[in-house]
Image (cartoon, rainbow, N blue to C red):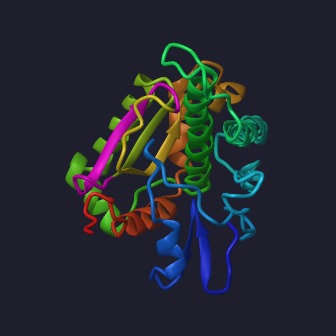
Amino acid sequence: MAGKSDKEIIGNYEVSKAGLLTRREVLTMGAVAAAGALVAPAFAAAGGATAPAASGPEPYVAKDFSGLQGKLDGLSASQIEQHLKLYKGYIGKANELRSKLKEVELASANATYSPIREMLVEQSFAVNGVIYHEFYFGNLGGKGGEPTGDLKSAMEERWGTMAKFNDFLKAAGKSVRGWVVIGYNTRGGFIDSFGLDTHNIGSPANFVPLLVLDVYEHAYMVDYGIDRAKYLDAFMKNVDWDVVGKRFNITKKHPTGLDATI
């Protein structure tokens, strides 16, 4: 990930190296999407480039994860290249749907079928397709192993040992059809886990992703065909626990919204 003199881009956040949240960081983290992922931040994951404001013509701008190509153990440059193409397709559709919803016909609104219904549902699919992929690519590029500090303690409290967590993650990865998301449950104040069969089904509210695993076939078929178990082994070897740990440290300070007082 690209860095700055006194800040660095970690996954979806700009974090001060001193570990302190700036006013901009707090504002960036100010809301969790109903689908469970953080609202897209103001900064791109690479190069520190700023994204256009939400009121602009294209609020979703693809982050540059091309640095992962050829740098991962067990995931080829071709595999990552194809995966990034799919991610950029979600960027395009998220922008398209947001634009069309501004002028969608309203008179025919109906819960069985209507243009507004279809666009709203598919917008959640496209936007979550963007965000979950950004968490996924953002937590790749490390050397695997184990987390440290508060994150390790929290995970051991949940799973007992990291060995048990590894077994759990691989079993979860074999069990769901889309995503395994390990995250911070802001409602309960603990690390939790969810499986999603598709981007916008099973994605809980008040749950912030920390470690995201893509198990759709497109994530591994170039390298492993249908052998998902080998892909899961490769994924574990490339987890960047420093990124996951910094996400965790930020998220613990993130308000749920339910605690707000008037």
Which residue is nearer to you in this view: 118 or 208?
A: 118
Q: Quadrant of the N terminus?
A: bottom right
How far across and how far down the image is residue 192, in percent? Answer: 30, 46
How far across and how far down the image is residue 232, in percent? Answer: 51, 34
Which residue is nearer to you in this view: 101 or 213?
A: 101
What's drawn in magenta, residue-wise?
A: 185-199
Which residue is nearer to you in this view: 115 or 32?
A: 115
Which residue is nearer to you in this view: 142 or 25?
A: 25
Q: Quadrant of residue 115?
A: top right
Taking 164 as reference, is 257 above or below it? below
Residue in the image at 53% along x and 82% along y: 17
How far across and how far down the image is residue 109, in percent? Answer: 55, 23
How far across and how far down the image is residue 171, in percent? Answer: 37, 29
Find out whether residue 192 is within the magenta segment. Answer: yes
Residue in the image at 60% along x and 80% along y: 7
Q: Quadrant of residue 214?
A: top right
Which residue in the rendered view is the most extreme toward the top? 112
Taking 219 as reference, is 134 above or below it? below
Tally the marks: 0
Which residue in the rendered view is the most extreme toward the front? 107
| Side (left or right) of 155 relative to 128 | left
Residue in the image at 57% along x and 57% along y: 142
Find out whether residue 154 is within the magenta segment. Answer: no
| Side (left or right) of 185 relative to 244 | left
Q: Quadrant of residue 168?
A: top left
| Side (left or right) of 167 relative to 122 | left
